[in-house]
Amino acid sequence: MDTEPSLYTVKAVLILDNDGERLYAKYYDDTYPSVKEQKAFEKNIFSKTHRTDSEIALLEGLTVVYKSNIDLFFYVVGSSHENELMLMAVLNCLFDSLSQMLRKNVERRALLENMEGLFLAVDEIVDGGVILESDPQQVVHRVALRGEDVPYSEQTVTQVMKTKLKWS
Amino acid sequence: MIKKFDKKDEESGSGSNPFQHLEKSAVLQEARIFNETPINPRRCLHILTKIIYLLNQGEHFGTMEATEAFFAMTRLFQSNDQTLRRMCYLTIKEMANISEDVIIVTSSLTKDMTGKEDVYRGPAIRALCRITDTTMLQAIERYMKQAIVDKVPSVSSSALVSSLHMVKMSYDVVKRWVNEAQEAASSDNIMVQYHALGLLYHLRKNDRLAVSKMLNKFTKSGLKSPFAYCMLIRIASKLLEETEAGHDSPLFDFIESCLRNKHEMVVYEAASAIVHMPNCTARELAPAVSVLQLFCSSPKAALRYAAVRTLNKVAMKHPSAVTACNLDLENLITDSNRSIATLAITTLLKTGSESSVDRLMKQISSFVSEISDEFKVVVVQAISALCQKYPRKHSVMMNFLSNMLRDDGGFEYKRAIVDCIISIIEENPESKETGLAHLCEFIEDCEHTVLATKILHLLGKEGPRTPSPSKYIRFIFNRVVLESEAVRAAAVSALAKFGAQNDDLLPSVLVLMQRCMMDSDDEVRDRATFYMNVLQQKQKALNAAYIFNVRLCLSVSVPGLEKSLHQYTLEPTEKPFDMKSVPLANTPITEQKTEFAPVATSKLPEKPGPTRQDIYQEQLAAIPEFQGLGSLFKTSEAVQLTEAETEYVVRCVKHTFARHMVFQFDCTNTLNDQLLQKVMVQMEPSEAYEVLHYVPAANLPYSQPGSCYSLVRLPEDDPTAVSCTFSCTLKYLVKDCDPNTGEPDDDGYDDEYVLEDLEVTVADHIQKVLKPNFAAAWDEVGDDFEKEETFALASVRTLDEAVGNIISFLGMQPCERSDKVPENKNSHILFLAGVFRGGHDVLVRSRLALADGVTMQVTVRSSDETVVDIILASVG
């Protein structure tokens, strides 16, 4: 491998829905500089992966590890020289963190209702392409979405009921 | 769980996306509530989420609107809601490049990074470093140093990673934090350790000694983090490669010891590092291969993929090292991940025996349509390699390739297939007809102009010499009717070649040509008219010169032609322009591709740059002594005149002109305490060669290569004196100098250094020229000056060896692939073509017979009698 040893491991983190639409996309370098190129890449990725549940692929010269759950597709993209298991560690951490935050309810709707949780979690896992944390416990702890912060006066009765029930 | 959406939303079915129809302007309008007091954290949070969502979808924000929203957002720092604050950090990072004056939040962020809330500190550091510049970085330097060694891992990691991002921008500032990073590297937290190691390496990577010390320290103390181990392995293998240390180095031992690490990630990294090391022996590979073998049966697809991909790489260089894994690879053939299955099969194709080929090909054709283009190219390359290894399997391969050709696929993929088929045709004459038939079928429906023209050219070259050339005419003429201009033009050229070589087809070809003359495109019409007229003459020599071996487009260097034509227009004369004055292009050496990386790496179109000879021509023309020599005829490969490890390294490049030769000596001074001046190479010829000029190199400082030249006149009265030996001496003025500053003393002394002898041989006078149709060229030159002689090569034992010797001795181009001797034959004919200095074509036909030693009958034809004599004299 003639590449410079570096901490910059992750080129992109993507979450698509089951129509291949972008729910979340974060690119960490200039492999795909414009939105147009990014969307084309996502389209290609989706068409090659959505039918098979096989975890890893080589696309456009990049290693893509992926995972799908119900109606969501999670992707972590790295250079083809990158250690595939490192990328897998990022993917697993992202998925497990979200799974905890969404109480195992990892599907599109729940995710959309907790977009800020997703934003914060990815921010804790990868920073500018460097793996910041790989332990889902730590990530969930740092994101620290605390339901109780919302004053009861601002919640509807149903919401309070739901929250109470969920927490109990 | 927080529910922030109305009940209505919740009930509208799972297909709804609360963000789907967001309008940027509406969201920005909503952002006004940021200014309300008291702040409503829940609503503000929701709006920030929407803004980030829009940015994430690639929505474009203008500078004005972004700045406005950003300034409104800064007010939210007054709220103490944790999630809201964290979303503010994110917004700052997302908008850092869009909004203006983002630095106004510096003080708020500085307050958070030094505050009591640990949850804020890490993210605040990262947001702050995102908006800061070198000058501001100095202002927060103290805090950064503290943060790096903070006992809270998230704070320390954030500071380290942010520092790493800023190395590019403010290396000098971050460099001062080395001690803190060093301290962080001994942290208990695995991520902190990893980040500290990464930062330390980036700060020290230009200092090999420091890197080596650092490696030494960490490999001894041991690390906890698997990520850090991977990084260490990469640094170690990079250092091994740079220092070219042997595999007995402690670094290699370290990498090998990582094969026994408890983390798969580390084990794989180590195995992959060993596999990628240059010149690893099979024994050193063995432990790496055996861990990869274990991974092949892992339940994790990523691990299986990583393992088989790496084994595939090993198989390219050391197929025997991988044979032990054949069983495990067999199990992967049916893997549900098609990438893994493809890699397993292509690896097996490299390591397996001939008998397994059929079975593997069958397996792979069952799912070839499911894999991505990248892997299809890998498959084609594997087949191409296989055909060279087992030529007898070509019919199976050809079938498979033609099926692949019919499937959908991108340009790269199709090109790989076409190249592969063409190389099979060239290797195996028996496969020619089937191959051509497949290609004909392919161009019937081919959207890639480049491929269609390439195939048409091939058809023109090979088609007329097949048993039934007429069947190709239909395919070619179809192109004329249906395709774009470039393809039509190529088709016309191909048709002409059929007409020129097959007398019975000539009338029909002429009819078709007539129709092409009414084409709408100029180029097509021109070509058709031209060929029509040539063909109607029915003269073999004309056909050969203008249809098969078109000299203009094949053998002349294009930049050279441009220069000559320019020169001609500057000096108007009565004489017509002489093509022979144009330098010939070197026939490109066809290289076998050995690299089969499963990645389509180069996306750039290959552009033919100026050739090596054109560059030399340019350089020589700049030296006043060499004006008026005419154009450069041939440049030889460099010859070493010294041993590799001596005080001075000298190599010589021979440039041949019409009546002169220029010797270019590239000298390097490897002594750092000497400065050489007035460097030249004195030459003593053995024959009637006359040294006219020496052009010395003025200065030759340590390790900076310089060139000096000698101009020699070739003997005119005896044109057969083509070979000569020169004894060479390097002469120069030495000045001692300070090794550190390079400052020389004032006084120096003359010295000399004896070099090895330099030979000029017949090959230096002949330029290689490829004649695609040797027989036609042979007739074209004619037998006016033909001579024949028989020689016995007693010392040569095989035909291959004889062919190699003759080619390198004469320096001519083998034609019709006659440089390849078929196996188990005891006779062979070698065809060679070239141009002699002065512009005379030379053709050599050499019949070789193997008995005791090799007997060789050489027939030489040329347009000039002396040339024939020279060649025969030099062979004898």
Image (cartoon, coloured by chain):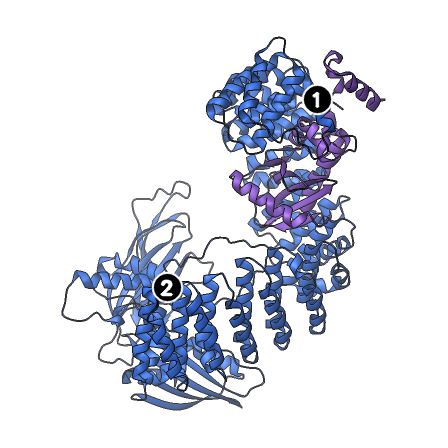
Q: Which amino acid does label 1 sit on?
A: Lys
Residue at 71% x, 62% y: name it. B322
Instruction: Please name the color used to draw chain B.
Output: blue
Is residue B869 rendered to the left or right of residue B250? Answer: left
Q: Between B788 and B249, which is closer to the camera in this rendering?
A: B788
Q: Name the secondary structure under disc 1.
A: loop
Q: Name the secondary structure under disc 2.
A: strand
User: Residue A92: x percent and y percent?
Assistant: 73, 39
Which of the marked residues, 1 or 2, is nearer the chain's N terminus? Answer: 1
Residue B88 is at least partly visible in this image: yes
Determine whether B861 is above or below B684 in the image: below
Q: Between B81 and B754, which is closer to the camera in this rendering?
A: B81
User: Residue B50: x percent and y percent?
Assistant: 61, 25
Quadrant holding the C terminus of chain B: bottom left
Residue at far right of view? A168
Quadrant holding the N terminus of chain B: top right
Determine whether B491 is above or below B484 in the image: below
- Residue labelled with disc 1: B4
Q: Which amino acid does label 2 sit on?
A: Cys
- Residue labelled with disc 2: B652
Residue at far top of view? B37
User: Residue B407: x percent and y percent?
Assistant: 60, 62
Instruction: Please name the color used to draw chain A.
Output: purple
Q: Which chain carries label 1?
A: B
Q: How many marks?
A: 2
Q: Between B747 and B64, which is closer to the camera in this rendering?
A: B64
Determine whether A37 is above or below B80 in the image: below
Is residue B277 rendered to the left or right of residue B553? Answer: right
Residue at 40% x, 69% y: name it. B490
